Amino acid sequence: MQKNFSLTQKMQIPQQASYSNATFDNNEIEKLSKSYEIHNGELVKNFLKKNKGLLEYINAITPLINNYFPKYKKCLTFCEDPEFHELDDITIYINSFKSSFEEDWKKLDELERELFYIAGFSTIIKGLVCLDLWFK
């Protein structure tokens, strides 16, 4: 008997992708720093090592983020929950301006909807990355 099955196609829960062959190259932080300002570099590196497939997901979504916010600076950091380590994540902050507040929130909402449907990554991996705007 298969769990998570529905006769309605929209209600089907996608199978989780497997990342057992994924490896972490120590130069990956340097590659990420070309797209993002990295904060807490050692913590980011450890979190990426611990969560196979996360680095590949970040690399996959970076062009989409750049498409929505091409001229904005972006910061990537590790966010640790003090009580529940299951809630730790990588947060990507997009540096915005107060003058474009409404427009940027709409763009961020569209981007997050697009990322929700990106194929090839598990919901677990997708849940380890948060996007937010950071206003100057």
Image (cartoon, helix red, strand yellow):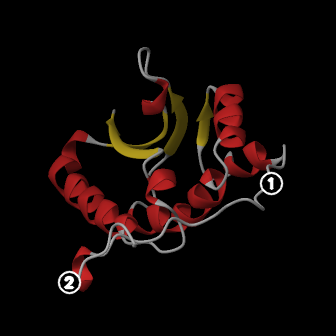
Q: Quadrant where the N terminus lies?
A: bottom left
Left or right relative to 105: residue 90:
right
Q: Which mark is residue 55?
A: none
- Residue 130, image x and y in percent? 40, 44
Distance of label 2 from label 1 (alpha carbons): 37 Å
Q: Residues within 10 Å of mark 2 (few under 14, many from 20)?
A: few
- Tell me if label 2 and label 1 are in contact, CB under 8 Å: no
> Of all residues shown, which one is farthest toward the top?
82
So how many labels did they put on this image?
Answer: 2
Q: Looking at the image, is 1 positioned above or below residue 57?
A: below
Image quarter of residue 113:
bottom left
Of 20 and 103, the residue lying toward us: 20
- Residue 132, image x and y in percent? 34, 43
- Mark closer to the observer (2, 1): 2
Q: Quadrant where the C terminus lies?
A: top left
Of 18 and 22, the residue lying toward us: 18
Q: Amino acid at mark 1?
A: Thr
Q: Circle 2 sits in a helix, a strand or a loop, which is it?
A: loop
- Residue 21, image x and y in percent? 78, 62
Left or right relative to 7: residue 55:
right
Q: Looking at the image, is 136 positioned above or below residue 53?
A: above
What residue sits 48% from the left and 36% below the top? 89
Q: Amino acid at mark 2?
A: Thr
- Residue 41, image x and y in percent? 68, 30
What residue sits 36% from the left and 65% below the top? 116
Of 113 and 22, the residue lying toward us: 22
Q: Residues within 10 Å of mark 1 (few under 14, many from 20)?
A: few
What residue sits 64% from the left and 56% below the top? 53
Which residue is labeled 1 in the image? 23
Q: Circle 1 sits in a helix, a strand or a loop, which is it?
A: loop
Which residue is labeled 2 in the image? 8
Q: Earlier in the sequence, mark 2 or mark 1?
A: 2
